[in-house]
Image (spheres, rainbow, N blue to C red):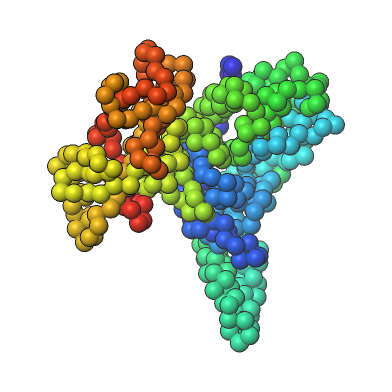
Amino acid sequence: MILEFVEENQNMSSVKLVNINKIYPNNVQAVFDFNLEIHDKEFIAFVGPSGCGKTTTLRMIAGLEEITSGMLFIDDRLVNDVAPKDRDIAMVFQSYALYPHMNVFNNMAFGLKMRKVPVPMLDKEGKEIYEIDKKMIAKYEKQLRLFLAQLKIAEENNPESIEEIQRNIAATEEKIEYYRTTPVQKYRYVKRSKKEIEDSVFRAASVLQLENYLDRKPDALSGGQRQRVALGRAIVRKVKVFLMDEPLSNLDAKLRVQMRTEIIKLHQRMEAITIYVTHDQTEAMTMADRIVVMKDGYIQQIGAPKEIYDHPVNKFVAGFIGAPAMNFIEGTFEKDHLSFFGYDITLSPERTKILQEALKDKEDKKVIIGVRPEHIIVTPNEEGNIALQIVETLGSELLLHFNISENTSLCAKVITNDVVKAGQKVNFTFNTDFLHVFDSETEVAYF
């Protein structure tokens, strides 16, 4: 349990991604037009299946991946070409990335020893110095001339590369305009004292309950303790932005739940921005202030956990967020009700009007009906025409699986003290206030 906070960060922080794209040399695009503004002290989770671009986006924020086009700002400062060590960020990796030959103290202190502290430069009157960065302007002007020369050659000999070169030209022109119009603060860099390093490590170790392990090496620690050391190495820096790349995926289920709570408490005490990447929607739902749901390099939806759960914008988000997943049924809309496999669901006048307007130009009126397991009402009935296929017992809850057609099965989540067994006959209905309907072709949500 985290008992105290190491030291508050009093400065307001922000991270802004503007039209960020990532295209690899083989012309594979991993991230498309990523736009997001992250506010001070906010906990943001990037969530999505493997290959959706969430880790690539995190690595671009960290400076570990080059941004193909677009602009990345940290505290209103353009950092596209700023080295990772100068971005005032700290990153926690999935694999812990601890030095095996160093003890816990030295693992946590290593970054402090190696990295100098930026101190604002002052003029004769004691005011902070801001200047137009002529070196960066010259750098990008040289780069622009190179791209323009490449474009001229491509127009004559290699037309398929024109689009990529034009993207590079546009991105470079944006950076030149930024540096011509935005003064940059000047810094000098000084080393930390030995006492400052020791104090920072001891405070972080106290927060993470690692005081008794400072002399141990990583191979003498449990998985949870190693993860705490990785977190400690990040928080000793007292940075403005923490980046976490699936830090709990190597832990067992019980320890994941425990560490999830620890990270939430740590974020609340650090009062910095936290950007957390995970494929586990439960982690995203329980930890984040806002969630960014991604698929195939595109943002699908951004919103608070409750907002995304209750109002998914499309079928993908609806099915990805929530455990067990939302049930989907192919059906049709007829006048004021939905029909599927011989069942009818009457809709409210408001929802009827939405579907009438949306489907007025479609002949077949096909839709996809979505209902979450907790919104299916199941009642025992010896004469019912539905037989339970599988009953999963989860303590206070039961998950009931049953078929409504040869190829369509539903999962219902119920709370009951009654004994329920597979093969039992039941009837079911839906809580229509929480029903979702999606377009059968685009899979966009109507409601």
Residue 256 sits in which quadrant?
Answer: top right
Place of residue 252 in the rendered image (x, y in percent of width and height, measured from the top left): 63, 26
Question: Of residues 398 and 222, which is closer to you in this image?
Answer: 398
Q: Residue furthest bottom?
A: 156
Q: Is residue 403 left or right of residue 353?
A: right
Question: Quadrant where the N terminus lies?
Answer: top right
Q: Residue furthest right?
A: 101
Question: Quadrant where the C terminus lies?
Answer: top left
Q: Residue at x 51, y 44 (%)?
A: 48
Q: Residue at x 73, y 22 (%)?
A: 222
Question: Of residues 363 and 122, which is closer to you in this image?
Answer: 363
Place of residue 286 in the rendered image (x, y in percent of width and height, measured from the top left): 47, 29
Question: Of residues 186 and 240, which is closer to you in this image?
Answer: 240
Question: Can I make out residue 251 in this image?
Answer: yes
Q: Residue at x 53, y 27 (%)?
A: 264
Q: Residue at x 18, y 52 (%)?
A: 356
Place of residue 102 in the rendered image (x, y in percent of width and height, measured from the top left): 83, 30
Place of residue 194 in the rendered image (x, y in percent of width and height, measured from the top left): 78, 28
